[in-house]
């Protein structure tokens, strides 16, 4: 069994394959005093449910869906004709248990994504949610750049790394925000960083969320209320939006987070001027220290 700490939560993984995926090695932990949030058995026997899913989707050659029964969730994955994967996860006191069974050979991407779904379900119970974003840390705080795929999130953080001293990339796809016990909002690196191998077991306070949209100019505007929620919510896991308990947990986390974290909309070109505009605005609004 391997033990990991992700977003401050302990998970145990037993069995083959899942524990050796890219990124996980940076989150290995030997803190035996920590009560696990999630235990994953990757060599279990899982029976399918005769229930219609609440959510279905497909990416490249993999289709998957999510079903719900009482307090348990079942994830089905199918890759090609004869490759099937079933994962059942349910709470047991303060811990979640997940059992995984496989038929055939699945790609690392599918197995990696399965771990993200399982951890994401469990983490919501501890006020923790992933945000699809590229996260840049500067002067001890992290700015999360949001946007649909292809809007230039990675390009923008790359410009920050080049143009703003004391900047580093925390994660380039799926950092996690967490409402800590005292109410502070922290952002954590994770083993899920898209095509960029940035697996940092670090965390900082959140400086701001900035949603990007491409434009022939650079213009920034701070958002509040329902408009701010509407810019951040689409970056939360869309799989969970179709199940009441999971979506309500996301709303609760965002409600607490946005009470103390600003949200901006940046219309921008992929240039240094856009970086200067965001950086100077966050300093002027006192969310970053220059």
Image (spheres, grey):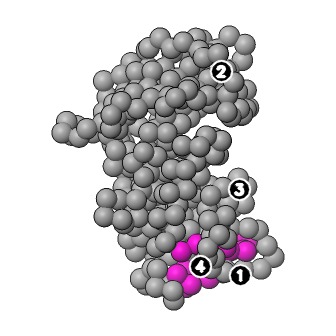
Q: In terms of sequence position, does the residue under pointer 2 or pointer 4 come before the other?
A: 2
Which mark sits nearer the N-terminus, 4 or 3? Answer: 3
Whichever of callouts 2 and 1 sits on the residue coming sooner in the sequence is: 2
Question: Which mark lies nearer to you, 4 or 3?
Answer: 3
- Would you place residue 104 above or below residue 256 in this image? above
Q: Earlier in the sequence, mark 3 or mark 2?
A: 2
Query: Which residue matches tag 1?
Result: 219
The residue segment tinted magenta is 262-282
The numbered disc on residue 278 is 4
- Tag 3, which secondary structure? loop
Rounded to the nearest angstrom, the CA distance separating label 3 from label 2 is 32 Å
Residue at the (31%, 64%) spot, across then down? 182
Can the viewer see residue 133 in this picture?
yes
Specify the label residue 148 is tagged with.
3
Give the alpha-carbon distance from disc 2 to disc 4, as whole Å. Answer: 48 Å
Q: CA distance from mark 1 to mark 4?
A: 9 Å
């Amino acid at each position: 069994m391997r033990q990991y700490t992700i977003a401050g939560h302990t998970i145990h993984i037993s069995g083959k394959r899942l524990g050796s995926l890219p990124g996980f090695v940076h989150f290995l932990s030997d803190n035996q005093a920590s009560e696990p949030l999630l235990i994953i058995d990757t060599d279990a026997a899982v029976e399918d449910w005769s229930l219609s899913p609440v959510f279905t989707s497909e990416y490249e050659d993999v289709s998957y869906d999510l079903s719900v029964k009482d307090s348990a969730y079942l994830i089905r994955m199918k890759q090609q004709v004869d490759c099937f994967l079933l994962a059942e996860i349910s709470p047991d006191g303060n811990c979640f248990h997940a059992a995984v069974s496989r038929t055939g050979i699945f790609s690392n991407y599918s197995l990696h994504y399965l771990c993200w779904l399982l951890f994401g379900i469990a983490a919501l119970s501890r006020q923790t949610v992933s945000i699809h974003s590229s996260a840049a840390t500067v002067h001890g705080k992290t700015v999360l750049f949001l946007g649909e795929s292809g809007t230039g999130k990675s390009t923008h953080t790359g410009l920050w790394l080049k143009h703003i001293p004391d900047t580093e990339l925390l994660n380039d796809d799926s950092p996690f925000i967490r409402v800590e016990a005292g109410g502070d909002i922290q952002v954590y690196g994770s083993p899920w960083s898209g095509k960029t191998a940035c697996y940092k077991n670090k965390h900082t306070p959140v400086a701001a969320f900035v949603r990007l949209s491409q434009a022939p100019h650079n213009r920034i505007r701070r958002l509040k209320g329902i408009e701010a929620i509407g810019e951040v919510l689409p970056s939360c896991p869309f799989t969970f939006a179709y199940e009441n308990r999971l979506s309500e947990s996301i709303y609760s986390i965002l409600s607490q987070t946005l009470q103390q974290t600003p949200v901006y909309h940046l219309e921008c070109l992929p240039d240094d001027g856009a970086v200067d505009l965001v950086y100077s605005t966050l300093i002027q609004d006192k969310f970053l220290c220059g």
